[in-house]
Amino acid sequence: MRNLFFLLALWLLSGCAKPDEPREYDVAVLGSGTGAIAAGLQAARSGAQTFLAGPMPWHGGMLTSAGVSAIDGNHHLPAGLWGEFRQELYQHYGGPEAVATGWVSMTQFEPHVGAAIFEKMARGEPNLTVLKEQKWGSIKRVDGLWAIELPGQGAIRAKVLIDGTDLGDVAAAVGAAFDLGMDSREDTGEAPAPQKPNSIIQDLTYVAVLKDYGPGQAPLLQEPPAYEAAEFFCICEDRCAEPGKLACQQMLDYGKLPNGKYMINWPIEGNDYYYNPVGQTDAQRMLAYERAKDQTRRFVYYLQQELGYTHLGLADDEFPSEDRMALMPYHREGRRVHGLARVGLQHMLNPYTAPLPLYRAAIAVGDYPVDHHHDKNPVAPAMEFPPVPSFSIPAGSLVPSDVPWLLIADKAISVTNVANGSTRLQPVILQAGQVAGLMAALSAAQGIAPSELPVRLVQQAVLDAGGYLLPFYDLPAGSPHFQAVQRAAAAGLLLGEGEPYKWANRTWIFPDSALQTAALLAAFEEVGAPAPTGTAQGPVSLRAAVQWLDGLSAHWQAPLGWPEDGEGRVAYLQQLAEKAGLGVLPPAHNLTRAQWAVLADELLKPFEHAPVDMSGRWLRGQ
């Protein structure tokens, strides 16, 4: 019946066209990943007629269908749809404290609640057509459009295609080049990478959600195949005296969800499972995924039978699956396309000295450390990762270098294997998907391939959609002058300072600190502009800022439109500062870093006069 309604809807929307006549869309998103729903929502919000199809009955990918409903990272960077989704969770459960139920995350929720939120968001977009539990067949570029076959439904056409799959299946189907497994150190320049490349990816996990049924009331599992109690003997200290082991209840509380439930996604001698599904048939994948489920069942059986958790059993009100397991596995890694920009460890460690200034083309942010899961693969080489500060993802990571009119919205974005350990997390992928949808809508509206979009246009659209370009811990969205500081910093006019910090890394912009001459000298070096002569060390006053702004104006050929004489320029700056909401600033006032950013942004308009390409390189000969 649902399929009949879909065909009827296509017929009506196409102006009473024949049912077998393909419906044309601006944007087609294929996949059931976290990035897919974000891409579909944003493309529709940006005015594009958008089609979203995926094989799962739920939206949300790893957040919902895979059951990874403990958000990793970005608690202080609520960018775009991630912040919107979190706010919906707060509303549902009753605030931030109500979702801070486990110690692995400050935001934990029941997967079915997340799925319902995404469903509501999708229904609220009139430009979005959704078809769930739908696979796709051939995908070809025909007469300037993507022709997509939908088994049982006919076909559609679209101007721009978005891959919203966990593994990059759509990108591979249309011929995009990709990397798989560990890169070589020689290729990426990353010290933790192995000397030679290999095809090893991270372990996956088939998540289960347990429910507290009351003492002795839980449905107990039958002994799963290949069960050996010794496999799990050291998961917690109640049985194992090894140093560093957690108490068993503390181990379970790792993924404690609201309403007496527990997410079972425990990496240490737990339910991770090694399997590389890339290049495998659907039948092969299903067999392997069943073995991964058995790994989780053995873990749960151990909890019930050996540790006595007979009040906990597979939740009967969570996933719409016969076996009560998650609807799909949690894939930490798959293909990684060859994009116009590739994020590596060096771009995270120090964005200002990396081989390419990717931060200038930033469109999304993350703060999670480099975290790889390889415990279940005995041949995986050992890798040690340095702590990293928070980081940005550039626009070019979403754009394949060899397939025009295609964008990537999920884990297949262009990053190295090492960097994937940080970029794979839910908030980052929500942002990547959102920006992929935004770029697709712009591309369709302007009739140019995504690779031709002006990066500064994309960045401004990201800011207008509530996103972050740069991951400033001390200047959250909603702060006064947030956009101005983001623009100035993305143009190199104000440099941040990264700080690795536990599991929530930071980058500081120090908006309220005094602007120092040394900071402007560093910025001028970054943008390639000659510094004014005779500048004094120490704080920079409003009067002194005139010569710095003059120098940047000449460098970027950005007309300032201010008086010729020096005192007139100082007065002009005073008027501009007051108009911009900075208050009345005397000529001798020492500017704060945020005040400098606002004045530079207002006068120089760097997003107009300092364009960059998808990798952050200047486009005007600097």
Image: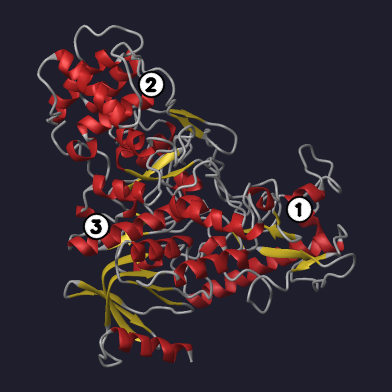
Q: Amino acid at mark 1?
A: Leu
Badge 3: residue crowd in 10 Å (few <14, some 14–19, many ≥20): many
386 relative to 467 in the view: left or right: right
Numbered label attached to residue 450: 3
Q: Which residue is pictured at 47% across the width and 66% down the height?
A: 121
Q: Secondary structure at mark 3?
A: helix
Badge nearest the viewer, 3 or 2: 2
CB atoms at circles 3 and 1 under 8 Å apart? Answer: no
Q: Is mark 1 in CB contact (under 8 Å) with mark 2?
A: no
Tag on residue 592?
2
> Residue 150: where, in percent of width, then height?
37, 82
Residue 375 point in image, percent of width and height:
63, 50
**Comparing marks 1 and 2, which lies closer to the viewer?**
2
The colour scheme used to paint the residues is secondary structure
Q: Kindly identify the amino acid type of the residue bearing the numbered disc 3.
A: Pro
Left or right: 506 in relation to 265: left
Q: Is residue 38 above or below residue 79?
A: below
Displayed quadrant of residue 134: bottom left
Residue 252 circle label: 1
Q: Secondary structure at mark 2?
A: loop
Disc 1 on helix, strand or loop?
Answer: helix
The residue shown at (25%, 9%) is 535
Badge 2, how many Cα within 10 Å: few under 14, some, many 20+? Answer: many
Labels 3 and 2: the sequence-earlier one: 3
Q: Which mark is residue 146?
A: none
Q: Is residue 153 above or below residue 207?
A: below
